[in-house]
Image (cartoon, rainbow, N blue to C red):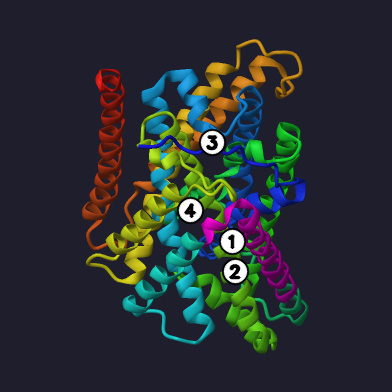
Amino acid sequence: MSEPTPVKPLPHLRFLDTVLYTIVMTVGLRWLPVAAAVGPASLPLWVLAFVTFFIPLAVATTELTAQYPGEGGIYTWVVDSYGPLAGFVCSWFYWVSLLPYFAGIVYFISGVILTAFGVAGKDATLYLSLSITLACFVTAFQFAGLRGNKWLTNFGAAGSWVIFFALIALAVVLLVRGETAGNFHNASWLPKANFSSAILWGTVIFAFCGVESVAFLQDEIKGGVRTIARVLAAVGLSQTLIYGVGTAAMLLLLPTAALTRLTGLPDAVRAAFDHAGYGAFAVVAIGLLGLSQLGGFTAWFGIGTRLTLAAASDGSLPKIFARRHPVTGAPGPAIILLGTLTLLMVFISQAGAGAAAAYDFLVSMSVLTVVIPYVFMFAAYLKRVPVARAPGVWVAPGGVGLRRLIGYVGLVSTLIAIACTLVPDSGDAHPLTTFLKIVLSALAAAAVGLFFYWAGRHRRSIAPALP
């Protein structure tokens, strides 16, 4: 077998490119109806998640990125702190979490498309067919490399901002007319201790996830860590603005009873435009919504291939997955692997279930598997806090005590999100079955990862003995 072709990525991403790339990855407008369905009590949760999760995540990401050059990201951080097994388990869950997330995104985009054309959104066959088509398109698009992909992600980020400002404008119009649906004066601002609040906390944490992924692009960002620090600050402010103000706008536009998880946002967009008298623009707005989600899918797909590259370069996966195209730098084998597994997840998620049930399962699996790596990441950060830094390496102000507090706050928020993910829905006819489906799926994913890990160690141990 020939060795992988060494290709050093060129720094294609400037500050604005990186901000847009990160926003389209980390900002999910589809979470707005989920939050708004809980009522005004969701608004304090956005602020709480920003303070207790995003700030610790941004601080830890910037410090660890400054200490570890290269594209290894969270994988390198955990390996150096706790060894190769912990690093592999962390990166494996991070990678596996992308599969239900990708499948969930294509289901959501399918719902957007069906809503835009006025087709009933209950047909599971339509969802499946559109999801397969979208997954194949994004997989094929990855072969253009980051230089080509950044245009779709930039357009996706622009679409997110256009939809956001459109919702704000419509809410203002209805507010001036006195036709708003929400009542902020008599509503409760404290979350209740029930399934909706539990799943919402897991969701808001999930909504703020992802900024650590910029470390995987460190070699492709002009300005390196200095640019990354500025990007994280800009993204944090953007996320908080979009989520908080966007949720408030949704509460003004539609009653909570009209909001659903699967097609809530496109339905809300159409209803809001109709209510304000601008129904002719609804299809355009819904199209931009689909474009924003497609951009996020494309961006995260690129991150997933880089995780595959890191694992293959380390020997945990076959070396073929470390190959890049000599011109575009696109990791072809890694792209094919991730695209194939995404299609498989789309099929598995719908087995024996309708579109809504499949989407709920994908969201729960995404939240659970994506937050587990943050336990490893914050643990690695806490271990590195007291270690002396080389001159010029960025550290958060406030000294060791404050930085240790920041790390523990992020860790506790992550653990609570994991627990909330496992809370059963009171309306679920088979709560134990749903709970076991999520837990067993996560354990099965861990078992598969450990198999790859031990198989990789076995290959390395016998390699010197081979002729």
The N terminus: image quadrant: top left
Q: Position of residue 335 (x, y in %)?
A: 45, 52
- The residue at 41%/74% (across/down) is 130
Q: Which of marks 3 and 2 is nearer the N terminus?
A: 3
- For the question of whether residue 320 can be seen, the reply is yes
Along the horizontal axis of the image, is 427 left or right of 83?
left
Q: How far apart in space, not on screen, are marks 4 and 3 (Cα)?
A: 44 Å
Q: Nearer the viewer, residue 113 or 70?
A: 70
Q: How far apart in space, not on screen, are marks 1 and 4 (Cα)?
A: 24 Å
Q: Which span is picked out in magenta?
A: 141-170
Question: Against 375, is 98 above or below?
Answer: below
Q: Mark 4 points at which residue?
A: 200
Q: Position of residue 108 (x, y in %)?
A: 47, 67
Q: Do the residues labelled 1 and 2 touch (CB within 8 Å)?
A: yes
Q: How far apart in space, not on screen, are marks 3 and 2 (Cα)?
A: 33 Å
Q: Which of marks 1 and 3 is nearer the N terminus?
A: 3
Task: Name the kind of residue labelled 4 in the image.
Answer: Leu
Q: Mark 1 points at which residue?
A: 295
